[in-house]
Image (cartoon, rainbow, N blue to C red):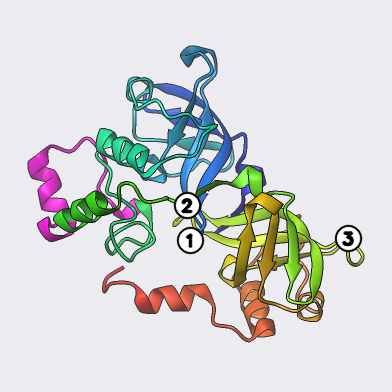
Amino acid sequence: MLRSMKDLKGYTIGATDGEIGHVTDFFFDDQRWTVRFLVVETGSWLLSRKVLISPYSLLKADWEHKRLPVRITRDEVKNSPDIDTNQPVSRQHEVQYADYYGYPYYWGGDGLWGTGLYNPGMAPPPGLDPETLAEVRTEVADVYARAESTLRQNDDPHLRSCQAVLGNHLEATDGDIGHVQGMLVEEDSWSIRYLVADTSNWWLGHQVLIPPDWVSDIRWADSRVSVNLTRELIQDSPRYDPATEFTRQQEHDLYRHYERPNYWEREHNSAPHGS
């Protein structure tokens, strides 16, 4: 199911032994358009420190009460690597974070979440002893991920703040079309499936959805996002109503309008057997 990232802001993060804090932002990588970290304001119990929570930590969400439980303790969060969320998160920071919690490296393979992984829930939970962990993760996958990390630990992880993207100007191949109003994220994979485009600067305030796969260029310094679509094609696309649930049929209609392959069939065909 798709969730509005605006709605997810403010959700409570609950550890196994108490509350951690509230979601204030998300970091996503602008190559795979997948949320890699939730930025959480801890409040007074941890001197209002902002910490990163990986989707690897998440348990089943309590959507009714706007609560995201995690399988870690407050002490684990307290003693986690101190990462300045106001500064770019380096690959070395990510390595330290993953090693601390015992998580796989999401950049260690072709899947959205690493070698053969479509969503973080497919990975083993943290805190397993080495022997059990070795049974869950094959030696080949583990060695591959670690070797890949060593080679790439100084790479630019391309992490961006979702909050910083909101308000960026959107431009089609033949002119401006509006600005980024929001994002829709898939709750299982934490992949950003759509940018919500507010076109009020161009025509009568309609909102439309644009898959990030169709983004051709992002100029962060200029706060501009370019998409490989014409203004007319966007204007004639199905409207998006944030007050109603966006259904799979509506997704079919959207991709049919643009005459482009949809993401769920593409990813299903490329997923490993049994996923």
- Please give the residue where the numbered disc 1 appears in the rendered image: 31
- Please give the residue where the numbered disc 2 appears in the rendered image: 158
Q: Secondary structure at mark 3?
A: loop
Q: Is residue 60 magenta?
A: no
**112 above or below 49?**
below
Residue furthest right as drawn: 204
Q: CA distance from mark 1 to mark 2?
A: 7 Å
Which comes before the other along the chain, label 1 or label 3? Answer: 1
Res. 106 visible in picture: yes
Q: Secondary structure at mark 1?
A: loop
Q: Quick one: quadrant of the N terminus? A: bottom right
Answer left or right for 54 relative to 206.
left
- Please give the residue where the numbered disc 3 appears in the rendered image: 201
Q: Quick one: quadrant of the C terminus? A: bottom left
How many residues crowd around disc 2 within 10 Å: few (fewer than 14), some, or many (20 or more)?
Answer: some
Towards the viewer: 62 or 96? 96
**197 above or below 146?**
below
- Could you tell me how many numbered marks the image carries? 3
**Residue type indicated by callout 1:** Gln
- At horizontal 42% and vertical 50% (from top left) the residue drawn is 157
Which of the 4 image quadrants contains residue 161? Answer: top right
**76 above or below 214?**
above
Q: CA distance from mark 2 to mark 3?
A: 30 Å
Which comes before the other along the chain, label 2 or label 3? Answer: 2
Answer left or right for 100 relative to 89.
left
Start and end of the magenta stretch? 121-141
Residue furthest bottom as drawn: 259
**Residue type indicated by callout 2:** His
- At horizontal 23% and vertical 49% (from top left) the residue drawn is 150
Res. 245 visible in picture: no
Give yes or no for contact between labels 1 and 3 (Cβ–Cβ under 8 Å): no
